[in-house]
Amino acid sequence: MDKIKPVRAMLRVLDVLQVLNSRNGVTVTDVANAIDLPRTTAYRVLETLCSAGYAVRDGSDDRYRLTVLVRGLSDGYDDEAWIGEVAQPLLGELGRKLVWPVSISTNQGNGMLVRHTTDKHSPLALERYNAGVRLPLLNSASGRTYLAFSPAPQRAALLDIALGSGGEMEGAGRQRDMIEKMLGSIRKAGYAISIRQYRGESTAAVPLYAGSALLGCVGMRFMDKAVTEAVFASRYLPDLKEAAREIGEAYLDWKAGSQQEPMEQIPTRRWDWTLERRVEH
């Protein structure tokens, strides 16, 4: 079959939805800068989403936010329930202990998807992100950690995807042997760190295992002026690894329990649009 040319307008709408989903309120300029759109185009897309009921503009600060109607877009998607039932409570405990924002991410194609984050509850978060943010495999701490600790065949396949997906690393960075050397250093250290130079913000991540299966990564964001890599390794890394271990063990317990539970005892959920709440029946 011939390759079908995508509808650019639809791609722009999806990009804007991703930006709205990743932040607690955005301006027209925020959206334009995030996905490299003209401000007039960003404004038209945002207003169109408002007209359709998927977004609303707050008159007090001129920021756009998603509405509950967006939940309907995911009703047909059965997300990994263990994130909410297993990972979130333990991640919340870790966030309260470390104070810096922490998150859990899993692999999704040529990137990592943030499944849960404590940004909203961290007083040290410079910019608060929501679940749903996508991170690049090669240029993020979580992505590099996941690549480093993936089984060799999976790592090779993921590198094929990453290096052929438009180029996250240019020039010498594309050389596979250099990437493999970097990943080897990450495996030896047990974690990866990525630095955003223009913000002075660092992100570190450790692998999350359930037995021998790599589920994803647990990460922490912090200011490199306040926390050097040496301080991170001595003060925060042990807690990050311990939290990853606890989440992995809790996942195995949850999986064993869910497999034993009769299907008729598992509550089904639907969204009550009038009351705007989950209803179990």
Image (tube, rainbow, N blue to C red):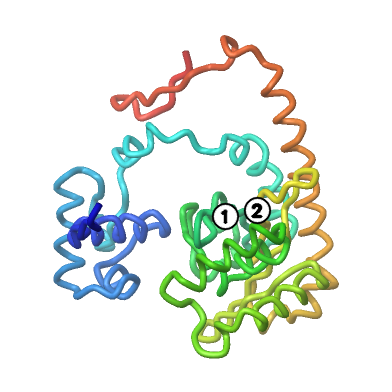
Q: Where is residue 51? Give x, y as percent.
A: 14, 47
Instruction: Please rate how many residues cluster around mark 1, counting C-alpha atoms within 10 Å: few if below 14, some from 14 to 19, many from 20.
Output: many
* Earlier sequence position, callout 1 versus callout 2: 1
Q: Secondary structure at mark 2?
A: strand
Q: Where is residue 125? Give x, y as percent.
A: 56, 66
Furthest-front residue in this view: 1
Q: At x 66% / y 61%, what residue is drawn?
A: 146
Near-viewer residue (127 or 133): 133
Q: Where is residue 165? Give x, y as percent.
A: 44, 69
Q: Where is residue 110? Give x, y as percent.
A: 50, 62
Q: Is residue 178 above or below residue 132?
A: below
Q: At x 80% / y 58%, what residue is drawn?
A: 241
Q: Are marks 1 and 2 in contact (CB under 8 Å)?
A: yes
The residues tagged by marks 1 and 2 sit, at their Cα atoms, a distance apart of 6 Å
Residue 46 visible in the current orientation: no
Q: At x 16% / y 68%, what residue is drawn?
A: 41
Q: Amino acid at mark 1?
A: Asn
Furthest-top residue in this view: 264
Left or right of 27, for residue 251: right
Left or right of 84, for residue 37: left
Which label is found at residue 216? 2
Q: At x 59% / y 11%, what residue is drawn?
A: 265
Circle 1 residue: 107
Residue 69 visible in the current orientation: yes
Image-quadrant location for residue 211: top right
